[in-house]
Amino acid sequence: MKKEIELKDDEYFITLKCVFGFEETLKEELIELGYKEVELLNRAIRIVGTWRDVYFLNLNVRCANSILVEIDHFFIQTEEDLYKRASKIGWTTIFDVKKTFAVKGAVFSSLFTNSHYPFLVVKDAIVDAFRDKYNERPDVELKRPQVVFDLYIKEKEVTISINTSGVPLFQRGYREAVGEAPLNEVVAAGLIRMSGWDRKTTLLDPFCGSGTLLIEAALLASGIPSNIERQHYAFKNLKDFDQALWDEIYNGALRNVRSLPCKIIGSDLSDEMIIKTRRNLRSMSFGRFIQTSVLPFNEVKKPDDEKVFIVTNPPYGQRLEADVTELYDGIGNWLKHEMTNCEAWIITSSEDGLKSIGLKPSKKHKVFNGDLECSFRSFVTYEGSKKIKENQ
Ligand SMILES: C[S@@+](CC[C@H](N)C(=O)[O-])C[C@H]1O[C@@H](n2cnc3c(N)ncnc32)[C@H](O)[C@@H]1O
């Protein structure tokens, strides 16, 4: 798509980065948000859009980690070419010398023996541009920079972008309390969408921990942007930040909010976790409509509704201790006997656990939760579903 497209003056290539395995899910979300031309990349999606789209997407997209706006794209033959080309970018027009900045990204190139070096080269080009013009330089801040640039080098091809989000978008701003092995919010939103939940059927998470899946499901079903509570966006620190446009987009984002159209139920063995979930729900408009209780999963009864949709993240036996085989065997029995006529989606990194469930998955996706490779599988149970010995 990229080569054939002629950008208009106010248009840019916008790259939305996501977690491995969620590319198709993010693509589907963007199509739902009205973006028809989307290009699938590795751990990312690219679209063409304006700064209005950049503000809109930072606020509204649930399944992306960060949003990049391309400012230059070129080819180099030697290491030295990187500094020469990077020096031509109008850095001093992008941000003010008083703001802190960082250059991050990824380098896959045999032109550089040290893969960290290209970041220093671009940092030097930025600093020198300010020194030449103002005799002053902006400070580098790696932890919480105000302005973030993204450098991506694949062999001789270089792309330099502004990371308009700054700290990753999973930092939603709503979570006060986290559990021991919490799901990242972007992954939780991605799993809910990947599961194909219709946003109407009762949703249940019997291993809810601090409630990430429950909250992301409720935000989606209520039409509330996941980032509505987030204050920090790196684009607000750019010279051309348009406060009036941001206010318009922010105020417009609540136009589609509706009251929660379904039941959402969470439980966990640990009372500490349920206290955390309730604390997280306290500030949410839908908080009091989400039922939570302290219960082992196998004591959770099917609510009276005809159908229940389960999305859950049980212990994997890696970060949390558990007898995995027994636990997953129990989950299989509970699904078969108690949760009949249901669809259950389970994410886990435990292969032994998956084998022990003893039900045949109807769908499966490979995804990552942090650096753990996981499988996200659905099990559909009917009246009289039978356990099987081996489901691989
Ligand atoms: C991986 S954590 C879930 C994290 C959650 N998705 C979040 O984002 O906070 C697994 C949870 O299962 C709970 N748990 C362990 N054994 C259980 C059992 N037998 N019944 C119900 N919950 C259990 C733990 O207390 C823990 O909170």
Image (cartoon, grey):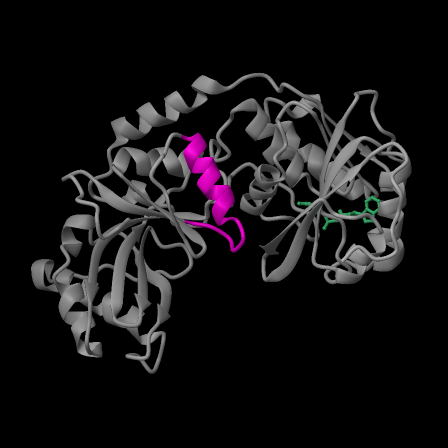
- Quadrant assignment, res 154: bottom left
Compared across the picture, whether 392 is left or right of 135 comes to: right
Q: In the rendered image, is residue 309 in sight?
A: yes
Q: Where is residue 236 in the image (x, y as percent from the top left)?
A: 30, 40
Q: Is residue 252 above or below residue 33?
A: above
Compared across the picture, whether 140 is left or right of 358 comes to: left
**Quarter of the image that includes the C terminus:** bottom right
Q: Is residue 130 above or below residue 184?
A: below
- Quadrant assignment, res 371: bottom right
Please state which of residues 180 and 3 is positioned toward the viewer in this rendering: 3
Q: Position of residue 367 (x, y in %)?
A: 59, 54
Q: Position of residue 235 (x, y in %)?
A: 31, 43
Q: Is residue 25 magenta?
A: yes
Q: What stretch is highlighted in magenta?
A: 17-33
Residue under the image location 20 percent in, 67 percent down: 75
Residue under the image location 89 percent in, 34 percent down: 338
- Quadrant assignment, res 48: top left
Residue under the image location 36 percent in, 34 percent down: 35
Give the number of marks.
0
Q: Position of residue 331 (x, y in %)?
A: 85, 46
Q: In the rendered image, is residue 127 in sight?
A: no
Compared across the picture, whether 81 is left or right of 230 comes to: left
Q: Which residue lies furthest to the left in this view?
A: 133
Please state which of residues 147 and 325 is positioned toward the viewer in this rendering: 325
Please state which of residues 347 and 340 is positioned toward the viewer in this rendering: 340
Q: Is residue 31 magenta?
A: yes
